Image (spheres, helix red, strand yellow):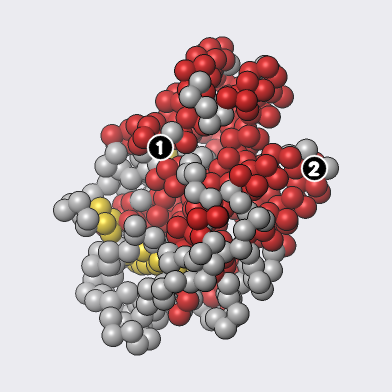
Amino acid sequence: MSDSEVFDGTRFRLFPQPGFLDSFAEPETVMVSSPPGTVGPGPSDDRMYTIFPVGKQDPYGIAPDGQAAAAPPWKGEIEEPAMPDENGNFDYLEPGTPQFETAHLFGSTRFVLDIWEDYFGRRIPFHSEKTYDRLELTILPSLENAYSGYGFLEMGGDKSTGKYRPFSLNFDVIAHEVGHAIIYSEVGVPDPENVTGEYFGFHESAADLVALISSLHFNSLVDLLLENTRGNLYMLNAVNRIAELSDNKQIRIAANDRRLGEFATGWVKEHHLSQPLTGAFFDILVDIFHEMLLDYGAISAEMEDLSDQLLATADYAPVMQEMFDEAYADHPEKFKQALLDARDILGTYLADTWDRISRQDLNFVDVADVFLEVDQDHTNGRFASIIRGNFRLRDIGFVEVGPQLAPLDKDSHANSVRTMLPMD
Ligand SMILES: [Zn+2]
């Protein structure tokens, strides 16, 4: 980082993936867009404020008895807020304090908003702006979940392993919830009488894609992913190796092989229903990455053709991995640039798609059609066959999703403008 950059924004230290994973034991310093001196105690700025309440019992939105419960702002006691240093930065804070947690939550939220405001080419308003001047970012350790709600993001923690791991330090979780907030704002809150099952699947998919693409803005994560795979991202589809290749949960969710046909007779969990759509977009990302590698001359047309022919055959892994090992060793910097290009193409296309799509009667084939239109407008349809092929592979546009087979969990999307983290 050069000295001049010190004056461009505000610095935070973020964990690209949960800090307990060995690869990311150290947080990465990032610069968010807030001009120096504009982020105050909390941290807080003109759009949001972060607090660590003391004595808060229940999450916002819904009380344990199912009745409407408290809404922000929290008026009780809070832990000492994180303070900026003399240059307005927060990267001096050390993990293990409430102040680091609030700074991590604020910094991650601002980092994700910066990325997506760039893709949208404008400010993304919060859906709650009619009621609330600012979004409250709240930490609630007693909550074993994370919520994106009207006027707030609320972060609990994971106790499933016996050790408490706060979601305020989990970039994937924060980015996923910011993703829900973006969709509420840009696509809208559905009319509960007319909402389709696929709307809920779309919402979950969009939140996962926001988290995935945002994660790919961490230098250290991109470098590690390329080093581990030698640029052969299709390898991630070999499910048994994903955990070894990437600790990133969003990548594991995205590199799936679910098809919409599996839901023709019905569905129960929207997060399962979302997987064919997320998987299609992940494969589109990988295919665009290959196109970029071709453009940069980092792989040959023969190698790409062979990759397409061998895909899903037993020969793929041994033959292709050797070719990728060599190509990556020759041009690591071109591989990185190609991945960043593909990331930004997908991010821009998704933002344009969400900008155009209507919440009424939303289903996956509508998303696919708008996405194709966006590609037509940007490149005259350069990626149309890649896009069509990947949606076809997922049965999108070829099967109808069946009925909802069991009621949504009472905490789920349907009965409030609050979305939760998929916990399965
Ligand atoms: Zn979600």
Q: Secondary structure at mark 2?
A: loop
Total labels: the figure holds 2
In the rendered view, tell whether residue 97 sits above or below residue 244.
below
Residue drawn 45% across the image and 57% down it: 272
Along the line of sight, which residue is nearer the eye, 210 or 280? 280
Say whether residue 224 is left or right of residue 190.
Answer: left
Residue drawn 83% across the image and 42% down it: 380
In this view, the residue farthest toward the right is: 380
Q: Is residue 64 visible?
A: yes
Residue 113 picture quarter: bottom right
- Residue topped by disc 1: 239
Q: Is residue 33 visible?
A: no
Whole-number angstrom distance, CA of label 2 to CA of label 1: 31 Å
Mark linked to residue 381: 2
Three-letter amino acid code at disc 1? Val
Residue drawn 48% across the image and 71% down it: 404
Mark 1 vs ligand 1: CB below 8 Å: no
The picture places residue 194, in percent across and down from the top left corner, at 60, 80
The picture places residue 384, in percent across and down from the top left corner, at 75, 42
Q: Earlier in the sequence, mark 2 or mark 1?
A: 1
Q: Secondary structure at mark 1?
A: helix
Mark 2 or mark 1, which is nearer to you?
1
In this view, the residue farthest toward the bottom is: 67
Along the line of sight, which residue is nearer the eye, 91 or 127? 127
The picture places residue 405, in percent across and down from the top left corner, at 44, 71
In the rendered view, tell whether residue 59 sits above or below residue 161.
below
In this view, the residue farthest toward the front is: 265
Along the line of sight, which residue is nearer the eye, 85 or 330? 330
Residue drawn 42% across the image and 25% down it: 228
Three-letter amino acid code at disc 2? Gly
In the rendered view, tell whether residue 319 sits above or below residue 28.
above
